Image (cartoon, helix red, strand yellow):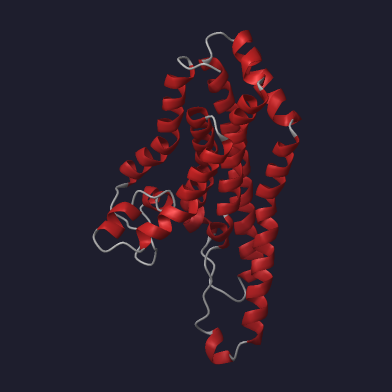
């Protein structure tokens, strides 16, 4: 508990953490801006086009912001200590080392579990309030399973970033891999020939929330080959594998 309290003090006393949280929650304002733009386009469109007007779910459009931001927080939670040398003090006080990474995981993952639902559910509320009279918006009960699973991906990205930071001990390298997983690799996979596009797309983080709920992905850029259980396991592995590697390496390396 003392190690956990110490890691919480570190996170909340770093200025970058406040900026990252502000950026994550700023995704809600981005959703408002997108909704206002969609309303303006709808109101200026002729009646013949309004009947078939559709808009993507805003919570999925802006989700990349808290995902990437909290992933970067996870990276900085440990790489900043290596950069400043504070990690030596942490390991001197906790010779076992692994409790340090475990405590960081609880703090960073916990913040992700708070930020994710706040952004996702607030964005859905914005969508329903601003767009419901103009565009088809799925009911809350229908969207709830996907809203929950989508919000969990924010915590997964936070833990993924922490694990990458623990393995690489380099903020630049870990953030580069994180950005690749969020944006670059899905673009590459989407342009591969079949069946590899669907096979690899099915294990991308963006596909997993809807696969977990069993939602139809025929209109998605991702594949839909995983069962709900397999998709849930894949989501857990995105966080568990880098964290497990970090736990294995953290005791055997010099600081």
State left or right for residue 242 relative to residue 30: left
Tell me if residue 176 comes above or below residue 193 in the rendering: above
Q: Is residue 25 above or below residue 109?
A: below
Is any part of residue 216 visible from this angle?
Answer: no
Q: Residue at x 49, y 31 (%)?
A: 168
Identify the image quadrant of the N terminus: top right
Furthest toward the left, the residue is 195
Residue lying at 62% horizontally and 64% vertically, measured from the top left:
127
In percent of width and height, residue 120 lies at 59, 51
Residue in the foreground of this view, choosing between 4 and 250: 250
Q: Is residue 12 left or right of residue 166?
A: right
List x then y, in percent, for residue 23: 69, 49
Viewer-side residue, 117 vs 190: 190
The C terminus: image quadrant: top right
Residue shown at the point (52%, 16%) measured from the top left: 254
Residue 190 locus on image (x, y percent): 37, 61
User: Measured along the vertical axis of the image, is residue 163 above or below residue 201?
Assistant: above
Q: Position of residue 138 (x, y in %)?
A: 51, 64
Q: Quadrant for residue 104, please give it.
A: top right
Q: Quadrant of residue 109?
A: top right
Q: Residue at x 64, y 30 (%)?
A: 80
Q: Nearer the viewer, residue 186 or 66?
A: 186
């Amino acid at each position: 508990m003392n190690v956990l309290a110490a890691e919480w003090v570190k996170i909340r006393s770093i200025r970058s953490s406040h900026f990252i949280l502000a950026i994550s929650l700023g995704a809600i304002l981005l959703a408002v801006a997108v909704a206002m733009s969609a309303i303006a386009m709808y109101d200026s469109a002729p009646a013949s086009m309004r009947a078939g007007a559709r808009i993507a779910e805003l919570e999925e459009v802006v989700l990349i912001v808290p995902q990437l931001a909290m992933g970067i927080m996870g990276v900085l939670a440990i790489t900043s200590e290596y950069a400043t040398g504070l990690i030596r003090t942490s390991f001197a006080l906790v010779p076992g080392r692994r409790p340090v990474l475990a405590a960081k995981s609880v703090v960073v993952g916990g913040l992700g579990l708070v930020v994710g639902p706040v952004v996702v559910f607030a964005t859905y509320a914005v969508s329903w309030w601003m767009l419901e009279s103009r565009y088809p918006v799925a009911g809350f009960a229908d969207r709830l399973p996907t809203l929950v699973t989508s919000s969990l991906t924010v915590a997964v990205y936070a833990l993924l970033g922490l694990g990458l930071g623990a393995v690489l001990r380099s903020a630049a390298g870990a953030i580069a891999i994180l950005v690749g997983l969020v944006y670059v690799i899905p673009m590459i996979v989407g342009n591969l020939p079949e069946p590899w596009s669907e096979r690899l797309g099915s294990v991308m983080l963006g596909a997993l929330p809807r696969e977990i709920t069993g939602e139809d992905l025929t209109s998605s850029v991702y594949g839909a080959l995983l069962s709900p259980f397999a998709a849930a396991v894949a989501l857990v592995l995105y966080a568990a594998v880098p964290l497990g590697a970090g736990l294995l390496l953290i005791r055997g390396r010099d600081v």
